Amino acid sequence: MTKISLSDLHNQLSADTKAIILDCRSPEEFDEAFITGSIHIGNQIARYVRLLKLTPEQDIILLATSEHARLIELFNKLGYENVKLADAFEDIHELSSLGLLDLIISIEPDELAMDLPFDEKARIIDLRTEDEFEKSHIEDAENIPLEEFSDVGTIAEIEEHENIYLYGNTNDISFVGSLIKKQGIHNFRKIQATFEEISKTPGIKTLKPKNKPAKED
């Protein structure tokens, strides 16, 4: 097993390496502090690796839990042999001192309710499936299912001046959020709640789309 120190990782990133950093920790750990440019995949490795469309030749650096040996074995079984393990960091100060620190800003539904009336640049993105979105969603939200983020063009359509609010499965939000940040867009918030919790929050209007007109015979 090849390991790489955080200082060596910093040097690699400075040299514009083509290696990709995949973070296998929980979304809660990732949101609090992560290595700049890394992508959160948590424990849903096969699913997210498929969406990332990584080639077998891809150089991969893992930030893993204590189960790193099993995870590297899993990557090898998926066809990825060029896998290294990054040293775990003890606290955010270690990352910060190397210029590697990033984080995801999470807000509660009641904070969203306070933000939206005054945020003219708000763009709410629902990452759930189309069926879930059709049943109910936050007013003015747009549905961009997770799978669409496998196309880099989806992220390219996000404007830097927009304030993005993401909601859906917490793992999916951290995954998509890390992809957005990797492209240099940082103005987004992760709504830290299930849709059921969001829908019960005073001040947040949820609705169902209007029925589509019936087709004429």
Image (tube, rainbow, N blue to C red):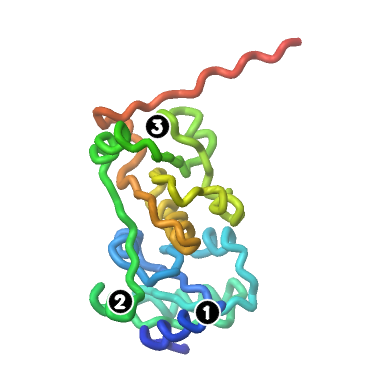
Relative to 6, is 91 on the left or the right?
left
First-in-chain label (3 vs 1)? 1
Q: Residue at x 56, y 53 (%)?
A: 156
Residue 100 x/y as whole percent: 36, 75
Q: Residue at x 43, y 48 (%)?
A: 161
Q: Quick one: label 1, few (<14), some, or many (20+) residues within 10 Å?
A: few
Relative to 54, is 206 on the left or the right?
left
The residues tagged by marks 3 and 2 sit, at their Cα atoms, a distance apart of 36 Å
Marking on residue 140: none
Which residue occupies the extreme top position in the image?
217
Element assignment for label 1: loop
Q: Residue at x 47, y 41 (%)?
A: 128
Report the front residue among 187 and 63: 187
Residue 213's place in the image compared with 17, above or below, is above
The residues tagged by marks 3 and 1 sit, at their Cα atoms, a distance apart of 40 Å
Q: Residue at x 27, y 47 (%)?
A: 107
Residue 197 appearing in the image? no
Residue 182 x/y as whole percent: 47, 64
Q: Amino acid at mark 2?
A: Leu
**Disc 3 target residue:** 138
Marking on residue 16: 1
Q: Quick one: label 2, few (<14), some, or many (20+) residues within 10 Å?
A: many
